[in-house]
Image: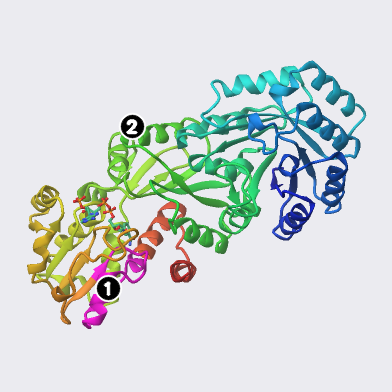
Amino acid sequence: MTYLAVPISGRNIKEATEQIGKACALGAEMLELRTDFIENLTVDCFEQLLVLARNTSLPVIVTCRDKAEGGCGEYPLDFRIDILCRAIAAGADFVDCEFVNFQDDSVENRLLEALEDSQTRLILSAHNFDQPFGDLAALYENIIDVCPQAIPKLVYKANHINDCFAAFDLLKNKTGDAIVLCMSAAGMISRVLAKKFGSLVTFASLSDEASTAPGQVGIEQMKSLYRWDHIDAETRIYGVIGNPVGHSLSPAIFNACFDKQKLNALYLPILLEGQKLQFNEFMSNLLKNNYDFGGFSVTIPHKAHALDYAEVEGDHLESLAADIGAVNTLKVGFGGQVSGYNTDYAGALNALLSTLGITKHQLHSVSTAVLGAGGVGRAIVAGLTDIGAHVTIYNRTVAKAKSLAEEFSCKYASLEEATNMDAKIVNNCTSIGMPPNVDNSPLPKECINCNMAVFDTVYNPLETLILKYAKETCAKTINGAEMFIRQAMAQYKIFTGNEPDEEVMRTTVFGALKR
Ligand code: NAP
């Protein structure tokens, strides 16, 4: 059992009462009374708060955190232990004391005496707000040695996603109850996966403002986006690997489809900072133990790293992905076999052909412009040259346009020269148009005419400036969401073997983009 606990961090009884009500309404499974947040805390005031919390019938943790371990108020140690002893006497389910303070004999004696003949369980916690603990397993053992009845709670900052694996390993190997979580954006996945790997508790905030630790996920997000109620030890894990990934729509669409098809699966944003070295470390970490990772969507800046990995270490690389020179999909088989694919190619071509209502053959010999020479540019150039379109690549860095053009036997020029183009179909594969470049267009309006079709691979915002220009000139338009949905559908099939529910994907994507 993993409890989804909400920290109650009101500054006074009124605020705390409101937070308790809200936490219950949002489906909290446990409350943590962070009494150190209460201003001018007294034992009477604490007892009032505990009665309110216990009236909810949810299990309650009482914490009066030391400032040195992330606490809010400056309450002295003796007073903080008074609060915990009163909590034990009043029958709180759990009390949380810092392990470092518990090693003070008087603290240990007071707490152990109070706990005699009590049902309350003691959590002994350790925090590192800067980095992972030097030896996490040894710290866990140390806590158990000092107090065998305690529940060790170990919380540290993950400076990189690769730091999370130590937490997963400890949870998999622990012998009794333990709480192990990573802080920071890179550690966010540990807060959700706590349930899969068996942490006794994970913490979710009521809102961003009420968050009591870095990387805490909101309870609404935990329940609706990250499928909290469906996660168990067997849940298969998928995700999007990239940097940044915070605004990706992929978790919403994949999790909505898993819901619809009642699959025991979860899709997470996986912030992977660094380059090839860190990417390879991540892959070797996830394969060294059976964590149940099933596959990944791969985005900027890791598509080339994923290609190299699949080529050198993987078991299969789709020949199309090798030709394009980018992998945007990695599947991890149940035996740990890794296969690389590219679904951008099919996603982009299908979006183009179906929105224009034409067949591949009708693109033969048609003059097309590809703006951009990155991962998506490569996929679209590969697709268009494959069906015999005449392609010119325009890119800010001309050397990249040249090398791509040489690979696929097409023409190239600088992005500025795109203003002189004579193309029937224009494909924007640069990131111009997405935040923070939303007021920019890779082409001025004068270069667009009503005989053209303009395809923007950028999907957020749905209507970019170049698409506005195209509409105003009565040119045909294809938005990036059409490609996004199609490439995600192909990924879903690779991951699960099932056809995804297209309607669910469309509703989720367009709903999110319109918001
Ligand atoms: P990438 O490999 O990083 O390539 C980025 C491209 O944009 C490069 O050609 C780069 O030119 C150009 N660029 C970036 N900033 C620019 C600027 N300020 N001025 C001029 N050119 C600029 O990225 P990618 O994976 O190909 O993704 C490109 C775009 O495709 C993204 O915006 C993304 O939204 C979109 N995308 C859409 C989907 C979909 O399903 N619809 C899927 C993936 C990506 P240089 O070579 O000169 O740096």
* Label 2: which secondary element: helix
Image quadrant of ligand 1? Answer: bottom left
- Give whichever of 174, 82 is nearer the camera: 82
Q: Are marks 1 and 2 in contact (CB under 8 Å)?
A: no
- Give whichever of 240, 221 is nearer the camera: 221
Q: Is residue 207 above or below residue 196?
A: below
Farthest-out residue, right: 117
Q: Which mark is residue 389?
A: none
Residue 454 image point, x, y percent: 22, 72
Left or right for 509, reference 45: left
Q: Magenta span covers which residues?
A: 455-483
Residue 341 image point, x, y percent: 32, 50
Residue found 33% across the figure and 72% down from its top: 463
Q: Which mark is residue 277?
A: 2
Q: Amino acid at mark 2?
A: Leu
Q: Is residue 470 magenta?
A: yes
Location of mark 1 (residue): 467
